[in-house]
Every structure is written in structure tokens, then in C-alpha cells.
Image: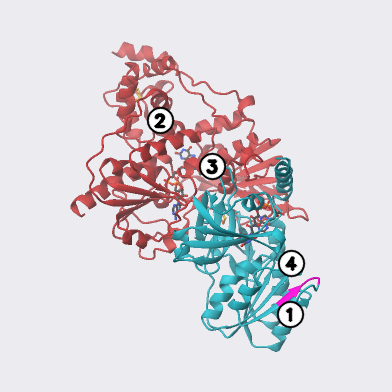
Chain colours: A cyan, B red
């Protein structure tokens, strides 16, 4: 059992932060790694990146968007409640290297995934520009944390309610044109990561993305998480989740994420109706 | 004596009652329902009590088969189960899943003239009898040695080591990557063949003896092998199985609707997705399902798909019936349940629609040529035999390999060229000090009983090492 010791709602309750007691994992976790959580006996195994860890206190932090039945169930958990299972740390840690000028681009809850990576890249001496965005001001998360984690923070909103009016890629383009960028890390919804990779390709700037295919075990045993990278099949849970954005087949990933869409939509709707009724 | 034998040969084997095919093909309840006491004793009476029994030679762990069968005849079921336990810690499992027809029953003297004694059924009977009627008394335990042993992986191999060493007085902890212990017994083999309550009880039996279970512990990630030694474990047994799914590497294999058998069966068994949406994990429900391969894993996948409501389920296999590696009983059960067999057939590519969903498969007909390395005749494609097969769900069950997760993080342990751990076949000793290994991670995908046999040998070797230092 893994106890929730802190809970916050962000982005108008669409995004939830949980700090969870998991000392073994907190001690081992590195930026870029994820955990798999299961709320109860009949629950689904849900992969979520660790947005932060505190090895001394033995806690880890997850930040997730409520998109379906399992994340809706997670949302109902209060401080003091427990997750039945937390497994990790899984996946390869981010390869951290001092390169000079680095740009971290985050969209939606991808910002949460980006946070520990940004902080680590800055800590080892990179000059980190961070560009984060959301649809609208109220959905923006972790602004102050990202400011602290980077050397220069730029904010965008699709509707112009805050910061730059437009997409993160608009700002990224300006930064790339200014030159000297050694690495771009782009994490967010698949279309955003694809746009980032397409944008950096002509600049020949190395681009890392973090992929989020459907997973079960997270240890390389099922192959459900397979993605095509450079024409080869990779298992995102053990070979990734970070890959060279210029090599990833994003179209395939987009399609594969829809595998259970219809079933899950019905299941989620039933769950919501049930919860409203009781 | 001769006359008695001759008379017995004519008595045919007592069939185990089972659910009718047309009913069971749509439910997940166990197929054979077990012998009654009368049936078991009638079947036990067929045993000749041979002086030189073939069956014992055929058993990988040398269970004294005539011995326990004799005790069943006498009605001493407690004695019978105790007798089996001295060699086999998981008889309720083995009675259900061992390929008896090529082991004990394949060598049974009665079987030379007629049907072999139903040894598997009898083994299952005594184990079930004990579970339902026994006292649940724990086996005697040696005084504590004060030494800690870690077992990585909770499949049949790891569980055997844990059971043996706890009885020898060690402090045993089993570390399991999944959230539930049991290995293939819980995530792979379906409920209708091996009820999960049975596995759970075996594990509970170990816990009652003092074995500690740590689930959600991915060794190589959550904790490394070297850290286990730092934590005070003096010996480590690796029974991590061969859980790396193999794919066909054909065009279109990443379409939605193509799953490894590992994924499909894990969803169905471990995550109980056949109860979706009562549980939260979904599973694809195909109408025209194709299973690639013809081993136990393929049969289990095909029969699961049928139970999930498929209109048709086809086994597609590139060799012929004689080469199918599955247990005879499972092939028979699958056929009875309406699974079709497309033998000497090989897929060449998968076809999908714009949404990336599988719609069909291109195939070639094959014929058998000269024997290959495995001694089986090599399948060769027949020119111009291309044909199309409609399908919306393909389950790939063409074998598995060694998962590198743990071994990659342990560079000082020797592996063979396929990534399996190199271990002494007699003791399970690896090239890393204090580390033993056995089961599928050493032999490649094999059987429950071989994994258990390797576990027993390793447990003996670990005991020696911790007692005498070698
Ligand atoms: C390595 C990894 C790290 C992740 N980290 C985070 C994180 O830090 N924060 C966060 O909010 N989410 C993260 N995700 C995504 C998260 O796991 C999914 O949103 C979650 O599984 C959805 O479960 P659900 O039952 O609530 O929704 P479902 O009912 O399963 O799905 C609802 C909708 O979300 C889509 N979906 C399903 N699975 C995924 C998935 N894996 N990724 C994206 N969309 C999906 C479906 O197509 C469907 O339309 C991560 C995924 C991976 C693989
Ligand atoms: C679907 C299916 C049907 C089968 N049917 C039969 C049958 O009818 N008869 C028969 O005799 N055999 C059958 N087999 C084969 C048999 O199940 C295996 O040979 C046997 O289970 C191997 O046992 P094991 O203990 O070596 O490994 P497994 O049973 O594979 O157990 C290994 C365990 O280790 C865990 N693990 C892996 N890596 C780590 C890690 N890094 N850290 C912690 N834990 C880890 C795994 O999660 C797993 O629980 C079948 C196999 C399958 C898949
Ligand atoms: S070989 Fe057959 S008849 Fe002889 S002891 Fe074994 S089970 Fe009995
Ligand atoms: S999640 Fe199963 S192999 Fe990656």
C-alpha cells in the first residue's frame, strides 16, 4: 500500500498532483523515469512519469490529467488514501550531458514530465530555455516551478489569455533561429511532439521526445508499448520512454493510442454516470 | 500375476468428467471437473504396481508414482499427498498442466498395450482432496539458520526454491515484478485450465511457513542484484522466466489488433479483463481471430478468444500436426471447442485500414522438406500459393526469449548467445558468486515441472553453499 501524503488540483481540477510514500522507488528514481500505479484490486495499471522525488522523505510526485476511467478513479483518492500498487522506477533515465544551450518544450501535462529533466539539465550546467504552453491560461501548470528549474521561461497560450498568443512551436522557432541550440527536449501531446520534431529537423538540432504508448507491465514482457523508431520496433517501457524525435513514427503512435478508445469511452461514461447517481 | 495383469489391461481408463464443449467454450470455469473418490480408486486399481516402473523414469522429478497410487487404492489420501510432496511441491498445478503423455504416462507399462494409467488425474485428485479436506498442517521446519536468501521471480521455479529453503531453516524473501505472485501460473495459463484460487493457495501455504513476498519489486530497477547482497542476502536465486515476447517481424505488425500472446493473456488472466468493464483493464474482442503458433501458449490464446465471444478462431501454424508442440490434451480440447487449424500455413504480411486497425493477413501455403536443426522437417513455401485471410485480431504466439532487464544490469554474470543465463545443469550455479538460476531463464521456454526440478536442485546447492561454503 502506498499512501498519498499530499494532493493538489490544478488547471481547474483537470490535472491532479499526488505526493505518494514510496521510499524504495524515491531512492532510485532518476529524471525521465516513470512508475506504474494501480488503485485497487480490479484497477488498471497506469503509467505516469515522476514529476519529482524526495529520496530523504521517501516520496514521489505524480501529476496527471483526468482523461478516462482510471485517472478519474485516481482523482477520487484523498490524502491518507492509498494506491494498492506502485511499481518503478521504470524506463531509461534521461541521458544528461552538459551541452550548452538547451531548450525544453512542454505542452499540457507534458510540462510535469519535463520538470525534473529541465531541472537536471540546468543543474549540470546547461543554459536552459523553457517554453511551456496550454490551451488557455487557467490550464497552465507548474509555471513557478518551471521558472525556477530553467534559466529563461517563455509561456504560450493557444487563445492568447496569457503570455505569447500561439503555440509553443512559434516560440521554439524564434529560439532556434537565434542559433546555437544543442538539444531540444519536447514533451506533450503527440501532435505537439511531432510538430517540435518537424521544426527542429531542418535546423539539425538533436531532439528528444518522451513517448506515452499504452502499457501493461512496463518491464518489456508484453510488447503492447511498441513504437517504431528509425524503422525498428522498440518497446517504449524499456528502450525508452525517450527517443530521438527525428526517428519516431508519430502517426503510428497516434493510431495505436486509440486502440481501446471506444471501449474506454463507454466505460468512462458509465463510471461518470454511476458516480453522479450515487 | 500374469493373468491379473492381462485382466487389468482390458479395463479402460476412467475418464475425468468435463464441461461439455458447447458450454465451456463461452465460460472461464475449469474444463475438467475432477475425479470423485470412487473414480480415483477405480483408476488407481488399474496400476500394476510395477517392480521396474516406467512412469518414474519418465517423471522429471522422479515422483514415486506407484507408491502414491497404491496409497490412493488403500484410501489413504493424506499419505498419498505427503508421498507426492517429498518430490513435487505443486501437485495441484502439475496434475493439471504437465505434458504427462510424453512423461510419466508416456512410459507407463499399461500404456504399451492400452491406455496408460491416468497419473496426472490421480495427482490432481490427491492434491485437490488435500486442499478441500486436509488439515492444512505445515511441513516440519529445520531450526533457523539465521541466513537470508532472496528469490527473484515467483514462477514455479522460484516458488520451489522458496518452499525448500524455508523448510531448511532459511529466511526467504521472494521478489516479484508484477503486483501478484505466481509467474506464468497467474499471468499466462488461463483460469479454465488452472484456477487462480489454486495458485493463490499454494502461495498462501508458503507465506504461512514464513516466506516473505515482495511484489512490485522489479530487480534490476527497483533494486539491483548487488544491492540485494548489500541488504544482507547471502544467496540469490534467479527464476525470472522467459518473458520477452517474440514477433514475426512482418510488414504491418504494429497495426491495432496484433498483440503478443503475453499481452493478450496478461490482460485476460492477470488483469482479469474477461470481466471488463467490471474490472478496469480492457481486452480486444475479435470476431475473426487468428492465433499464430501451435504451442500451449497458442492453444490458451485461441481458447481465451473463443471464450471472449469470437465468431471464429483459427490456429495458423507453418508446420504440420505432428510438430505441434502443445500438450495433446489441449489440442484436443481446442478442437472440441471449435477452433480451426490452418496447418502448413505462414503469414507474410498484415493489412489494415486507415485507422491503423487490422483487417486481414496475407498467407502462403507450406510443405515439409528436409529436417532442420531441431530435427523437425523444415517448412518450405509453395510458390504461387498466396491467399488472403480476413481477421480483426491476431495473437502472436511464436515463442518467447530472455528478458534482458535484469541481466543487462548485472554485467558480471555470463549469458549464452541468446541472452539466457549460463548455469550448471546439476546445481544451477551461475558465474556470479552467490547467484543461482533456473527455469525458463536458463533453458528457454520449457515446462512447469522442469522449472520446478531446476529449483529443487538449486535449493539443495544453495543449502550446501550456505552450510559448508561450496
Ligand atoms: C511512460 C508514460 C508516462 C506517462 N506520464 C504521464 C504523466 O506524467 N501525466 C499524465 O497525465 N499522463 C501520463 N501518461 C499517460 C497516462 O498513462 C494516460 O493518460 C492514462 O493511462 C489514461 O488512463 P485512463 O484510464 O484514465 O484513460 P483511458 O480511458 O485509458 O483513455 C482515455 C483517453 O486517453 C487515451 N490514452 C490511453 N492511454 C494513453 C496513454 N498511455 N497516453 C496518452 N493517452 C492515452 C485514450 O486513447 C483515450 O482517448 C503517461 C504514459 C506513459 C506511457
Ligand atoms: C500461456 C502459457 C501456457 C503454458 N502452458 C504450460 C503447460 O500446460 N504445461 C507446462 O508444463 N508448461 C506450460 N507453460 C510453460 C511454463 O509455464 C513455464 O515453463 C514455467 O512457468 C517457467 O517457470 P519459471 O519459474 O522459470 O518462470 P515464470 O513462470 O515465467 O516466472 C517468472 C517470474 O519472474 C518474474 N520476473 C521477471 N523478471 C523479474 C525481475 N527483473 N524482477 C522480479 N521478478 C521478475 C515474472 O514477473 C514472473 O512472475 C506455459 C507457458 C505459457 C506462457
Ligand atoms: S508404469 Fe504405469 S502401471 Fe507401472 S507403476 Fe507406473 S503408473 Fe503404475
Ligand atoms: S509495457 Fe509491456 S513491454 Fe512495454
Position of the N terminus of chain B, as image quadrant, is top left
What residue is shown with label 1?
A171
Of the two numbered discs 3 and 1 in the rendering, the one whose residue sits closer to the viewer: 1
Q: Is residue B212 above or below residue A130?
A: above
Which circle marks residue A138 in the picture?
Answer: 4
Circles 2 and 1: CB atoms closer than 8 Å: no
Chain of the residue under label 2: B
Where residue B315 appears, as percent x and y from the top left, is 62, 40
The secondary element bearing badge 2 is classed as helix
> Which secondary structure class fits the magenta region best?
strand
What residue is shown with label 3?
B297
Q: Is residue A155 above or below residue B235?
A: below
For this rendering, which residue is in front, B119 or A238?
Answer: A238
- Marks 1 and 4 sit apart, C-alpha to C-alpha, by 20 Å
Does the rendering let one see residue B138? yes
Position of the C terminus of chain B, as image quadrant, is bottom left
Judged from the image, the quadrant occupied by ligand 3 is top left
Q: Which residues are magenta?
A: A155-159
Does the rendering let one see residue B391? no
Amino acid at each position: 500500500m502506498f499512501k498519498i501524503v499530499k494532493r493538489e488540483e490544478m488547471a481547474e481540477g483537470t490535472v491532479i498532483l499526488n505526493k505518494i510514500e514510496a521510499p524504495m522507488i524515491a531512492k532510485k528514481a532518476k529524471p525521465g523515469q516513470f512508475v506504474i500505479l494501480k488503485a485497487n484490486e480490479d484497477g488498471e495499471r497506469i503509467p505516469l512519469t515522476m514529476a519529482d522525488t524526495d529520496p530523504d522523505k521517501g516520496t514521489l510526485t505524480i501529476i496527471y490529467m483526468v482523461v478516462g476511467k482510471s485517472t478519474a478513479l485516481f482523482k477520487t483518492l484523498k490524502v491518507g488514501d492509498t494506491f494498492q500498487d506502485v511499481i518503478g522506477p521504470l524506463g531509461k533515465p534521461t541521458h544528461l550531458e552538459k551541452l550548452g544551450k538547451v531548450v525544453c518544450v512542454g505542452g499540457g501535462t507534458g510540462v510535469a514530465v519535463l520538470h525534473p529533466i529541465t531541472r537536471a539539465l540546468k543543474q549540470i550546467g546547461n543554459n536552459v530555455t523553457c517554453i511551456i504552453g496550454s490551451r488557455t491560461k487557467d490550464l497552465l501548470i507548474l509555471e513557478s516551478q518551471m521558472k525556477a528549474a530553467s534559466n529563461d521561461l517563455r509561456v504560450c497560450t493557444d487563445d492568447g489569455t496569457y503570455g505569447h498568443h500561439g503555440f509553443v512551436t512559434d516560440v521554439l522557432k524564434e529560439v532556434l533561429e537565434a542559433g546555437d541550440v544543442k538539444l531540444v527536449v519536447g514533451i506533450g501531446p503527440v501532435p505537439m511532439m511531432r510538430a517540435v520534431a518537424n521544426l527542429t529537423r531542418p535546423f539539425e538540432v538533436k531532439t528528444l521526445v518522451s513517448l506515452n504508448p499504452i502499457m501493461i507491465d512496463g518491464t518489456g514482457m508484453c510488447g503492447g508499448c511498441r513504437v517504431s523508431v528509425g524503422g525498428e520496433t522498440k518497446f517504449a517501457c524499456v528502450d525508452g520512454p525517450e527517443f530521438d524525435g527525428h526517428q519516431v513514427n508519430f502517426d503510428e503512435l497516434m493510431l495505436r493510442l486509440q486502440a481501446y478508445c471506444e471501449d474506454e469511452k463507454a466505460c468512462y461514461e458509465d463510471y461518470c454516470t454511476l458516480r453522479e447517481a450515487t | 500375476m500374469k493373468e491379473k495383469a492381462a485382466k487389468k489391461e482390458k479395463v479402460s481408463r476412467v475418464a475425468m468428467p468435463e464441461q461439455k464443449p458447447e458450454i465451456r467454450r463461452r465460460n472461464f470455469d475449469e474444463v475438467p471437473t475432477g475425479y470423485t473418490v470412487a473414480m480415483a480408486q477405480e483408476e488407481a486399481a488399474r496400476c500394476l504396481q510395477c517392480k521396474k516402473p516406467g512412469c518414474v523414469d519418465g517423471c522429471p522429478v522422479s515422483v514415486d508414482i506407484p507408491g502414491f497410487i497404491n496409497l490412493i487404492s488403500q484410501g489413504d489420501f493424506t499419505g498419498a499427498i505427503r508421498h507426492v510432496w517429498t518430490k513435487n511441491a505443486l501437485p495441484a498445478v502439475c496434475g493439471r498442466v504437465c505434458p504427462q503423455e510424453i512423461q510419466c504416462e508416456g512410459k507407463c507399462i499399461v500404456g504399451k498395450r492400452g491406455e496408460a494409467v491416468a497419473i496426472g488425474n490421480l495427482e490432481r485428485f490427491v492434491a485437490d482432496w488435500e486442499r478441500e479436506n486436509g488439515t492444512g498442517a505445515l511441513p516440519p521446519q529445520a531450526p533457523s539458520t539465521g541466513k537470508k536468501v532472496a528469490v527473484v521471480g515467483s514462477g514455479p521455479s522460484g516458488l520451489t526454491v522458496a518452499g525448500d529453503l524455508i523448510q531448511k531453516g532459511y529466511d526467504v524473501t521472494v521478489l516479484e515484478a508484477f503486483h501478484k505472485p505466481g509467474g506464468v501460473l497467474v499471468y499466462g495459463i488461463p483460469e479454465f485450465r488452472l484456477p487462480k484460487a489454486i495458485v493463490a493457495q499454494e502461495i498462501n501455504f508458503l507465506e504461512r511457513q514464513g516466506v516473505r513476498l515482495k511484489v512490485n519489486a522489479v530487480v534490476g530497477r527497483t533494486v539491483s542484484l548487488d544491492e540485494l547482497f548489500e541488504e544482507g542476502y547471502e544467496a540469490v536465486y534467479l527464476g525470472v522466466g522467459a518473458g520477452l515476447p517474440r514477433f514475426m517481424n512482418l510488414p504491418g505488425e504494429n497495426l491495432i489488433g496484433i498483440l503478443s500472446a503475453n499481452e493478450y493473456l496478461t490482460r485476460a488472466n492477470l488483469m482479469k479483463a474477461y470481466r471488463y468493464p467490471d474490472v478496469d483493464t480492457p481486452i480486444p474482442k475479435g470476431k475473426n481471430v487468428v492465433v499464430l503458433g501451435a504451442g500451449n501458449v497458442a492453444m490458451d490464446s485461441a481458447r481465451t478468444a473463443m471464450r471472449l465471444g469470437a465468431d471464429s478462431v483459427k490456429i495458423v501454424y507453418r508446420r504440420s500436426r505432428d510438430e505441434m508442440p502443445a500438450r495433446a490434451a489441449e489440442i484436443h480440447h481446442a478442437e472440441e471447442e471449435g477452433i480451426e487449424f490452418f496447418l502448413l500455413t505462414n503469414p507474410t504480411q498484415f493489412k489494415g485500414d486507415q485507422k491503423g486497425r487490422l483487417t486481414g493477413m496475407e498467407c502462403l501455403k507450406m510443405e515439409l522438406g528436409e529436417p532442420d536443426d531441431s530435427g523437425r522437417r523444415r517448412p518450405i513455401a509453395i510458390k504461387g500459393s498466396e491467399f488472403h485471410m480476413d481477421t480483426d485480431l491476431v495473437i502472436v504466439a511464436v515463442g518467447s526469449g530472455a528478458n534482458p532487464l535484469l541481466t543487462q544490469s548485472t554485467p558480471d554474470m555470463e549469458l549464452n548467445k541468446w541472452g539466457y543465463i549460463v548455469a550448471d545443469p546439476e546445481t544451477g550455479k551461475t558465474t556470479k558468486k552467490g547467484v543461482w538460476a533456473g527455469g525458463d531463464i536458463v533453458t528457454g521456454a520449457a515446462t512447469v515441472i522442469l522449472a520446478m526440478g531446476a529449483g529443487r536442485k538449486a535449493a539443495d546447492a544453495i543449502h550446501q553453499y550456505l552450510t559448508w561454503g561450496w
